[in-house]
Image (spheres, rainbow, N blue to C red):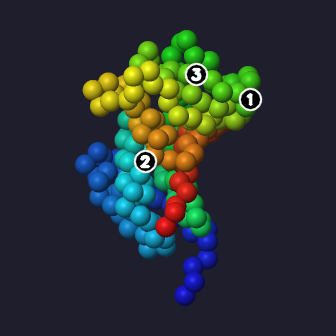
Amino acid sequence: MEQSFPIILELETPQNVDDIFSFTRTVLQKIMQHKDVSLAEQRKIKLILIELITNSIKHSTDGNSQIKLVIDHPSLSIQKFEKGLQIEFSSSSQQIPFEDIDKTLKISFSEENRHHIQTLGKYKFKFLNPYLEEGLSIEHMPEHFGFYIITLASDSFIYQYDPDDKENRYIVNIDLQS
């Protein structure tokens, strides 16, 4: 029987660090029920899920977050929704809400953790490849290093904040080649 795309799966994220591994394994199995995924793509999906869930456990204000998977040929969208405070950058960076839309900005979470972003709206931006003076190494991983990992493992990584609902939205897209 031929599958009809898109396939949408909604899941509650674990609230305990000890449950991350089994959750990522379950999610990957659910994806693979609908789409063949190469080993390299599986690794990227695992890294993205681990970072999104770790971020939720660390920063969600009510302890609840949801993952929404949209499997559409040939792409996979991993979306995380959680209540919480909006992302804040270091004081030297422009802050949300953005005034200039469709601009590339250099922002930082700290002196060692800098990113390029493209503003997409007052409360929405896309992570671009991190700018690294000496390359990224495990010895120099800054706070929020998960954003580096997600940016490098995905084809697109977008953050959006809804000030009315006080909800953070992380949207990660991967083009699946399999």
Query: Residue at point 52% right, 63% down?
Result: 177
Which residue corresponds to mark 2? Answer: 48
Label 1 neighbour load within 10 Å: few <14, some 14-19, many 20+: some
Does residue 148 appear left or right of residue 91 in this picture? left
Q: Secondary structure at mark 1?
A: loop
- Expressed as whole percent of the image width and height from the top left, the position of residue 59 reads 42, 34
Residue 54 position by quadrant: top left
Q: Residue at x 54, y 12 (%)?
A: 91
Report the residue that reaches farthest toward the front: 134
Front position in the image: 72 or 136:
136
Question: Secondary structure beneath disc 2?
Answer: helix
Q: What is the C-alpha distance between the residues marked 3 and 2?
A: 23 Å
Q: Tell me how far mark 1 sits from mark 3, CA to CA.
A: 14 Å
What residue type is disc 1 on? Ile
Q: Nearer the viewer, residue 4 or 38?
A: 38
**Image mark for residue 101:** 1
- In terms of secondary structure, where does tag 3 sit? strand
As drawn, the label of residue 138 is none
